[in-house]
Image (spheres, rainbow, N blue to C red):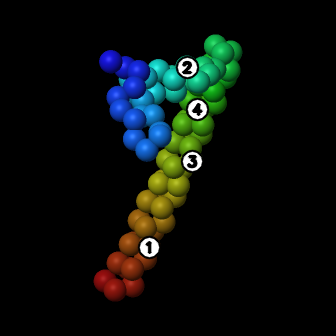
Amino acid sequence: MAEIIEENEGVKKESFVTSLKKEAAKITWPSKKSLRTSVKVVIISMFVFGLGIYCADLFVNKALTMLNSVIFRLIG
């Protein structure tokens, strides 16, 4: 069933399952040490970028609040 479905112009067509097995055999999985290092880098990066976005949000919020109060005092 999974070997050859049909032959078309001299080119053999393999079934989906056979080609999937061949491609899955080519996969190289990372070692546990490499995987743990990568996970640590991702988690630390998430916290650093999250903190950066939080600080930028605080700055923009404070700047807009100050701008609003200045405009309110000028216009009335």
| SS state under label 4 | helix
**3D distance between C-alphas at marks 4 and 3:** 15 Å
The mark found on residue 42 in the picture is: 4
For mark 3, what is the residue? 52
Is disc 3 surrounded by few (<14), some (14 to 19) or many (20+) residues within 10 Å? few
Between discs 4 and 1, the one toward the N terminus: 4
Q: Quadrant of the N terminus?
A: top left
Q: Is 20 situated left or right of 33 in this image?
A: left
Disc 1: which residue: 67
Does the residue at mark 3 contact the one at mark 1 (Cβ under 8 Å)? no
Percent across and percent down for residue 32 are 64, 13
Point out the frontmost of discs 2 and 4: 2
Relative to 55, residue 63 above or below: below
Q: Which residue is mark 2?
A: 25
The residue drawn where x is 35% and y is 28% is 5
Viewer-proximal residue, 71 or 76?
71
In the rendered view, does 43 fall on the left or right side of 62?
Answer: right
Q: Amino acid at mark 3?
A: Gly
